[in-house]
Image (cartoon, rainbow, N blue to C red):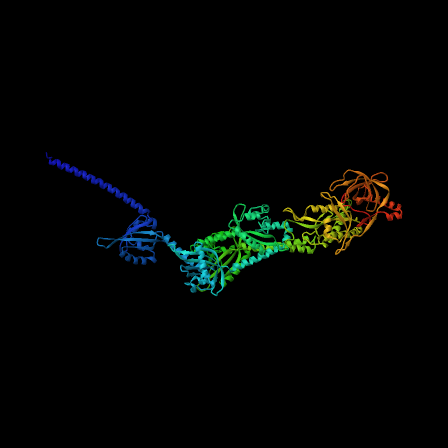
Amino acid sequence: MESNPKDRLIQELRERVYALEEIESDRDAIERELKATRERLQHLLAVSPAIIYTTKASGDYACTYVSNNLQAIMGYTPQEMTTDPKCWPDHLHPEDARRILDECPRLIERGRGTLEYRFRRREGGYIWILDTFKVVYDDAGRPLELVGAWADITEGKHAEQAAIEAKRYLASLIQSTSDAIISTDKEGKIVLINEGAEALLGYPATEVIGQPAAMLYGSEAAAKEVFREMRKRGGSVSGFDSVARAKDGSSIPVLISASMLHDQEGRDAGTVGFVTDMRERRREQEALQQAYDELEKRVEERTTELNTAQERFQYLLTVTPGIIYTTKASGDYACTFVSENVDPVMGFSPWEMLEDPGFWFSRLHPDDAPRVATEMAPLVERGGGTLEYRFRNRAGNYIWIQDTFRVIRSDGGRPLELVGSWADISYHKQAEQALGERMAIMKDLQTLVAASPSVIYTTTQAQDSYACRFVSENLTPIMGYLPWEMRDNPTFWAKHVHLDDAERVFSKVKQLIAQGGGTVEYRFRHRRGHYVWVQDSFTVVPDKEGRPKDIVGSWADISDRKRTEDDLKRLAEKVEKHNRFICETFGRYLTDEVVATVLESPTGLRMGGEKRKITMLMADLRGFTSMSERLPAERVVSLLNRYLTTMVSVIKQYQGTIDEFIGDAIFVLFGAPIWQEDDAQRAVACAMAMQLAIASVNEQNRQDGLPEIEMGIGVHTGQVVVGNIGSSERTKYGVVGSQVNLTSRIQSCTTGGQTLVSEATRREVGPILKLGRQTEVKAKGIEYPITVSEVLGIGRPFQLYLPNIAEDLVPLAEEVPLSYSVIEPNQAGGELCSGALTKLSRKGGEARLESPVDTFSNLEMYLVGKDGQSLQGTLYGKVVGPVPGTRTDFSICFTSIPPEIESFLGVLLAQAADAQPKSARSKAPKRRRASSPKNGRALPSGPAAS
């Protein structure tokens, strides 16, 4: 059944209402979406760095829309810009407005365009704008409006202008610097040569631009060698030694640092190089080497002096930057001496290096050891040289060492040892390596200037305060200041020149400016307060009228060179001072000839010790200790000084070396420090002369009321260790060994006026000796008996003989009882025994002793007078030997006679002589004496004979 038309109409209306409701709902959603989109767009425009705008396409280009970020960038509100038609053209920079208004129509015809101009901000000042727009056309194709964006490019423009200015300034700096810079294209033709290169080679730039670089090297092969080195080392070469050919044909030694240039695709585009003139540096190196060689020669000549003055020498070795050493001349070159400053430089103690023969060689760098081993032998053969190698210190790091040595040879020309010095040159090696690395990564000329070891600078004025305009960044590591500190203070340079140098420097600079440039050296205050020596080399840049305008130069730190010069001067002064010290010191004990020989011989006094055969003489006064106890101190000193003065004069006459004075004893060396063929002969002749000289000493003693003295001398020849003995605080040149003790034992066997020599000395002297009695002696501390001979004289060429003085031994009418003990060295008397004097002379006698005693024993005797009482005082004597044909009778030489006993014995001797018939007197046994005091008194050297 068909529906009612009314119902259908109602249904249709309902459907339409539903449709309209859906449409309304969709429209609300679209409006909400459009609103959100509009808000997002407004936010994006507000935070965008570019200002979005629309303007008319002609006329005054009035603004019709502008984004809200206009105010943040230019300071204007969007209403100001859109309501004022002339707001945009009126704010253009006057210098840009005409150009912009002329270019706009042409760009609009093309449909789009880009402009750059300056636009005035609301608060004043101009900013650079990048204006990019597109034309919107109407339906008829006519320009309707411009839609575009303004971007603030002020910072970019400033950077661009700064880059242009820097490029222009850098080009000016390169052209005016005194260093030579040369650049070539990929075909090897010269494209750039600065004024420094023109001055060095003599070519004007117009002559060489476009020419092959080979013309500056003299040949194609030399130029290719440089290019080959660059390719071999990865595109750059640093510190390459070469030779440049000047326009006049002369060859100039140069140091080249160069790099390959590449285009954007990485292909070779040419080269740029830094050429340093090495002529002056080589002259300086030669002068320095000559000074070093001269110094080394002087040090070698004064080795004897430095060894003797050990304390001063050790101080010198401690403060010097070089380590002094000696080593064997072959094999493993084992170290025999090294100075104390090896510790702060390498970290090792001297004993570590001395006790390990392989110490030095085992610590060479593995890459250097084969080369050093190969080069050592030829250098030793040539007499010395210099090596550079790496050496491992205690911390395990390798340091670069410059090893300079000379060879000390024997008389036969055979190498004995190497004497040299190690200097730590790690700093210089590191500096060279750092310079090479900088040059290797150099990409443009600015890097080249920054990597220079010198501080590059320019000043804006060539007069007055010399205010700094530019200074390179390496000012900071060299002088401690930041570049801006020097640039911002016009008087900075003048105020930091050392006061002692200022007047000279300012005067010199004015002269050099008038000459167009030059070099001056002075001290400049470092930021830390100390002064560094700088070498200031500069060139004057004139203005258009030729007047001095700017100064372009460089500062080089030459403090090391100045310190080296000062060190050389101070070292020379110290060597001279040591030389005077040696002459004054040795001159007291040696002849002038011996002192001169020691100073001229580099091995005369070698550091440490060595075994050597020498002849030793020991002289000692008899009874001096007992005598000194009885006399006032001032008279003892007067007597001792007279004796020593006379003996020293005699010893120097026979070229002996006085090792030391031991109280009244004198120990003399013959053969040290200088060995001679006739050492033993001169030693014995000296002993004879000393015995004869005692007579003159006693004559003066008698005139002054002083006792007379007698002396015993022992002479022995043997192997001893000779050298500097002691510690680092106190050192003495002397000898040690058992042979020294044996000499002392021989001397202890002598009586007053007697000289005894060992068999070794007797053989060394030969048949010119006149000998007396020979005796076999068992000396304390000597395992085997020794034979000693009494010397009565020595023949040609000396011709010295002792007078033959004999003394009569007179039998006593009554024996004199006594008690005695044998005195051991350094000990008091032992057990008392009984005995009696049977015969007597002025200086000795015979005694019957309770028990036998050894020959040369020292006796301490107490006499008993006629009343049976012991006499006051102690009589000392030395046993000369047994009386032939008896067991208990011994000959005794008195060594110390107190005044009380001397008077008693004098009475006994007079009575015995008077009681003896004349015929018996002539037949009485006689005791020979080399010398005899006229008053009958002998003076001992101690409680017993020394």
Quarter-of-image position of residue 204: bottom left
Residue, far bottom: 248
Q: Quadrant of the N terminus?
A: top left
Residue 424 position, x and y percent, is 54, 51
Q: Residue at x 28, y 58 (%)?
A: 106
Residue 508 position, x and y percent, is 52, 60
Q: Residue 347 versus residue 3: which sits nearer the camera?
A: 347
In screen coordinates, is 850 left or right of 105? right
Q: Is residue 648 visible?
A: no
Residue, far top: 1
Q: Is residue 162 above or below residue 858?
A: below
Q: How many marks?
A: 0
Residue 919 position, x and y percent, is 89, 48
Residue, far left: 1
Quarter-of-image position of residue 945: top right
Q: Residue 256 versus residue 574: which sits nearer the camera?
A: 256
Residue 97 position, x and y percent, is 32, 57
Q: Is residue 492 visible?
A: yes
Q: Residue 847 versus residue 900: which sits nearer the camera?
A: 847
Q: Is residue 475 above or below residue 12?
A: below
Q: Residue at x 31, y 45 (%)?
A: 43
Q: Quadrant of the C terminus?
A: top right
Quarter-of-image position of residue 829: top right
In screen coordinates, is 712 left or right of 114? right
Q: Residue 9 versus residue 716: which sits nearer the camera?
A: 716
In screen coordinates, is 412 left or right of 266? right
In screen coordinates, is 381 left or right of 862? left
